[in-house]
Image (tube, rainbow, N blue to C red):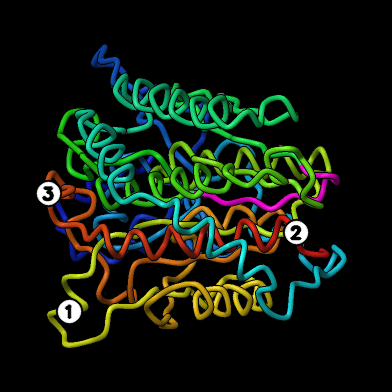
């Protein structure tokens, strides 16, 4: 087996230099007549663009991420993008414009920056939320307990609302809250719960305040506010709403891929998926003299769903949106798209002004703007309510 040491080549190495064919699983360990028993390094199959795959080591995965290159880790199932083409599914007709202004604005008053700050303080207190670590498992359990408390306190459990752990082989569970409506038509709102320090993931601190602790508390607060609506709590909305917190996004969208593959295999009728990944950093935007805004991703997303996101921001947020791009597999919405579900993604700013402290020890709560996080929470809550009652 040919193994290239990326660190020795430096961070500027061209990613194409590490591409290799599938390793020979029957190859004997190195050492031969010298009696050495050198373990063969584990290999992972990644997809960097639709249909462009490579076998790499784990350290090579992290080197790619340090270079700003995103990918899906498809080792387990080896499904390439798109596994299910959207053209194979009936097109979803999204609302022309938001229709529940009075109710949504009333619910928005219940959003709390203090709640989000308090939850994020606890969430970032774990040494890391790396998906293979014991801290990652502990932080996931804490998150599950918070979601369960929100559902229990609302009384929505009496109408069938649930929270469950979606278990994965690596130990950190994804968390899924389901608020059933009158139909199985489902709208998913997602964020990823894991964090990573790309230099020594298993050992170094990774508070992950912005990436993606901010998105995690954003959608948790939106769930809390949504469950103040009696019709939603009593299961009277036409559509089912799910809030999902994904494990192992940093490892190559591992958790969300497993969930949406499972949903596809069971023909779960997901009509839309909205991802919130990094919702709290504004300093670079302001330093550049640009207006604070919500970044609306326009590449590798569903254009019609994205248009409804634009209208939702314009209706319910106090700041404008800006269109931006982030490339292939930049967050968990790509997993929904991969399995044929319409997806959209919003981020804290124009992508070029997004937080550069992520994946380090410095991704701390002190650098975040909770007024900005509140804008994302408003948009998330509005989107959830509008889609719960939409004719999809």
The region drawn magenta spans: 181-190
Q: Which residue is label 1 attached to?
A: 286
Residue occupying image coordinates x 46% and y 62%: 378
Q: Quadrant of residue 283?
A: bottom left
Q: Which residue is label 2 attached to?
A: 389
> Is-magenta flag for residue 182?
yes
Q: Quadrant of the C terminus?
A: bottom right
SS of the residue under disc 3: loop
First in residue order: circle 3 vs circle 1: 1
**Circle 2/circle 3 CB separation < 8 Å:** no
Observer-nearest residue: 359 or 389?
389
Q: Which residue is farthest top? A: 35
Report the Cα–Cα distance between label 1 and label 2: 37 Å
**Circle 1/circle 2 CB separation < 8 Å:** no
Q: Point out residue 104 in the picture as x, y percentages from the top left corner.
A: 58, 62
- Left or right for 284, reference 248: left
**Circle 3/circle 1 CB separation < 8 Å:** no
Q: Point out residue 140 in the picture as x, y percentages from the top left corner.
A: 41, 27
Q: Which residue is label 3 attached to?
A: 362
Q: Point out residue 310 in the picture as x, y percentages from the top left corner.
A: 54, 79
């Amino acid at each position: 087996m040919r193994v290239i040491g990326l660190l020795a080549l430096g961070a500027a190495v061209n990613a194409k230099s590490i591409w290799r064919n599938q390793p020979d699983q029957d190859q004997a360990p190195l050492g031969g007549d010298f009696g050495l028993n050198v373990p063969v390094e584990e290999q992972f199959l990644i997809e960097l663009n639709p249909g462009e795959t490579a076998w790499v080591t784990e350290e090579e995965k992290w080197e790619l991420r340090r270079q700003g290159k995103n990918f899906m880790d498809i080792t387990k199932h080896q499904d390439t993008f798109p596994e299910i083409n959207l053209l194979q599914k009936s097109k979803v007709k999204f609302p022309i414009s938001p229709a529940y202004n009075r109710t949504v604005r009333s619910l928005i008053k219940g959003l709390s920056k203090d709640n989000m700050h308090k939850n994020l303080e606890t969430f970032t207190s774990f040494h890391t939320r790396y998906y293979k670590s014991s801290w990652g498992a502990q932080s996931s359990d804490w998150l599950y307990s918070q979601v369960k408390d929100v559902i229990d306190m609302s009384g929505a459990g009496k109408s069938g609302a649930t929270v469950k752990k979606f278990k994965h082989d690596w130990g950190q569970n994804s968390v899924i809250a389901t608020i059933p409506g009158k139909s199985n038509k489902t709208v998913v709102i997602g964020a990823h719960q894991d964090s990573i320090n790309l230099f020594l993931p298993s050992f170094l601190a990774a508070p992950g305040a912005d990436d993606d602790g901010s998105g995690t508390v954003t959608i948790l607060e939106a769930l809390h506010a949504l469950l103040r609506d009696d019709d939603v709590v009593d299961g009277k909305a036409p559509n089912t709403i799910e809030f999902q917190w994904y494990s192992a996004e940093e490892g190559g969208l591992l958790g969300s891929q497993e969930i949406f593959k499972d949903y596809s295999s069971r023909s779960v009728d997901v009509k839309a998926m909205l991802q919130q990944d990094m919702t709290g950093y504004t300093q670079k935007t302001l330093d550049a003299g640009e207006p604070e805004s919500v970044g609306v991703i326009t590449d590798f997303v569903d254009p019609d769903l994205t248009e409804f996101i634009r209208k939702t921001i314009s209706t319910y947020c106090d700041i404008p949106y800006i269109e931006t791009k982030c490339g292939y597999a930049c967050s968990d919405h790509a997993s929904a798209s991969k399995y044929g579900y319409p997806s959209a993604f919003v981020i804290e700013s124009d992508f070029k002004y997004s937080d550069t402290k992520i994946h380090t020890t410095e991704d701390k709560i002190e650098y975040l703007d909770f007024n900005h996080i509140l804008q994302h929470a408003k948009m998330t809550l509005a989107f959830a309510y509008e889609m719960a009652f939409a004719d999809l």
